[in-house]
Image: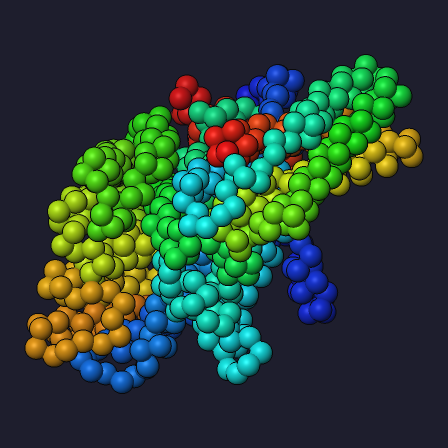
Amino acid sequence: MSTDSIALTAVQDANRPWSAVLHTWITTVDHKRIGILYILMSLIFLVIGGIEATIMRIQLIVPHNHFVSPQFFNQMFTMHGTTMIFFVAMPILFGFGNYLIPLMIGARDMAFPRVNAWSFWLTAFGGILLYFSFIGGYGLYGAGAAPDVGWFAYAPLTSPAFSVGHSTDFWTLGLLISGIGSIGTAVNFVATILCMRCPGMTLGKMPLLVWLNLVMGSMVLFVISPLTAAQIMLAIDRFLGGHFFDTQAGGSAVLWMHFFWIFGHPEVYVLVIPAFAFISEIVPVFSRKPIFGYPIMVAATVAIGFVSFGVWAHHMFTVGMNSYANSFFALTTMVVGVPTGIKIFNWIGTMWGGRLQFKTPMLFCIAFLFQFLMAGLTGIMLACTPFNWQLSGSYFVVAHFHYVIVGAILFAIFGAFYYWFPKMTGRMYSETLGKLHFWLFVVGFHLTFDFMHIPGLLGMPRRIYTYEPGRGWEIWNLICTIGVFFQGVAVLIFVWNLARSTFAGKVAGNDPWDAWTLEWSTSSPPPEYNFAQIPAVSSRRPLWDLKHPEDPDLDV
Amino acid sequence: MSSVSTTSGTLETQWALPSRGHVGMLCLIAAESAIFIIFVVAYVFYIGKSVTGPTPKEVLEIPIFATICLLSSSVTIHLALSSIRREKLGAFKLWWFATFVLGAIFLCETGLEWHRLIFEKGLTVRTNLFGTTYYSLVGLHASHVTVGLILLLTVSIFAVLGKVNSEHEPRLDVLAYYWHFVDAVWVIVFTVVYIVGR
């Protein structure tokens, strides 16, 4: 096997009519195309969710603003949260996983290609159903309404008495359907990783991205299922007149909270573990060193996976659990910090003494390290039950989890975009625009989310559509909103950079980063069959061995 | 890269990975188990919390015959698979069809029980918390039985047409995993609904 023999050109769509091209994309079962479909769908929803966030921030820029109505504001925060978690973060990570896992393990496709396509279209249909609520939420009698119950949809807000029309039905069914799609993808990830590895790729020789996606896939099986079950119960309540969450018939609103957060908290780790996976691939390549502490990284990820299932009720300290439950969940929450801290040390250990190359993907990874650490520290603060009693439901919490989801997960996703863009398109992005995107986004992110902690500490509750002047919240809200525009411009530059470079970027070649995992050994973009000859590997860095026969990685 | 290609030959001969069908089914079973766990938790949490009747004690009768049928179908599907492994296609068809019939009897018994509860005892999803949780949990299981019966029937039709032989044994084995799972869930549902909750 040599690099020349597998440097094949991809099948070009250029000379075919657009209807035939569209048909091949819609009926595709190729993991790379499904991955790209996932990513494109997520980018569309990212823009929609971003517009919703911008509307909220404009409404809050000054006290007593009348930019939108309170009812519309409720719809905005509900749709923003639901969209960003279920139709941006999860599918974009599934998209990268779909694209990269078979390439990295030297396989020609996922274990179940048709289930893969089915899962994608379910997710897309769930998203369309959710947004159809804007025109169909009131059913047949009048204009529409989007869900306005908050992204965790606490009972009794979702009961037929308080949520008339069909807005909550669209929310329930949209998430139920996309959840089934997520379970299908998770089954596919686990089966692919366990059953489709190329000869020689033992579990201990898999790239860390694959390992972390294995943990993520296994978690999704147990994370999404409780949500699916809870959505079925809610649908029974709403459509069949059941009483699961109907307190007047003896049902329990707190049970919904438990079921939702049994999903909701591990979900954060489902999102952040693939982000860790990107960092674990990008940092070593741009430090010119193998990852530091590979087995510890795997063990820490598995530990995070297990512990994350025992922390959910830290979202519910203010519900009035007994002190044993409060202590237990405070303790487990702090325990999660230990394996997470180990990972941060290992990434720093990888960079330590390396020949660092500050390309755009690496910049996003370095910002990730700082911001994820900060997010973890406010997480530890919120894990302390008495502190949490004070700040639960305030903007401090909003700032904390946006630090995790934007500051850590979105930054890692941006890094991954720039890192694998040459592989996916065969073209190089513009490094100048990439760096501009990075710096504008860093400034915007810190303006918005650093200063968002302060009105929270000053007592500003989340989800209010406006506020009184004279409470000391004005300046902080103004700064937060200004930051949003920096982020918006940065995202526009990002989209422009990708769109322009896809057609006009300079040709990237198979291996622009001098990297060492298998996806860089095939052409860019890879042919439909990925590898002309299924590779055989004997170390964690097969491409390094190929390029440096005098210094092989064989004894790892 | 001669060193890599020489080792690849020996690696390929030793390289054996688990079957994707079995791993995929086990993953699906894991996810389904989590769904059932949430429903069982809700059922147990709401035992005795109904504010109106009827109570489980008043209306539920233990479905012993249906349970015997469903649990024996695990044995018959096992016998069917061991028959096909030994190339005994006649015995395979017999045991496979017996599995389908036993499962169908179970589903009919559940249907009759629901008919009795709805039309004689007046218990529906709307009546009280017991009705909501009972129909949800038993109905979730019954829907899994229904899916299993469709799969069993499909294989039965192919078997009658003579299209099933021993090379299909791994796929039938994956289907059997699902059927065993459906049976195992019934043991839990039976315990929770008819013993603990009654």
Q: Residue at x 91, y 34 (%)?
A: B161
**Image: A201 above or below A475:** above
**Image: B128 above or below A52:** above
Task: Name the one closer to the observer, A483 or A139.
Answer: A139
The colour scheme used here is rainbow
Q: Residue furthest bottom?
A: A66
| Residue A524 visible in the current orientation | no
Left or right: where A32 falls relative to B145: left
Task: Name the one closer to the observer, A467 or A84.
Answer: A467
Residue A333 x %, y %? 24, 39
Q: Residue furthest right?
A: B161
**Image: B53 above or below A452:** above
Q: Quadrant of residue B111?
A: top right
Task: Name the one closer to the observer, A371 or A174.
Answer: A174
Q: Residue at x 24, y 43 (%)?
A: A321
**Quadrant where the N terminus of chain A is found in the figure:** top right
Residue A78 x %, y %? 38, 66
Number of numbered discs visible in the structure rendering: 0
Q: Residue at x 58, y 78 (%)?
A: A140
Residue A287 x %, y %? 30, 40
Q: Residue at x 21, y 69 (%)?
A: A480
Left or right: where A105 falls relative to A271: right
Residue A275 x %, y %? 37, 46
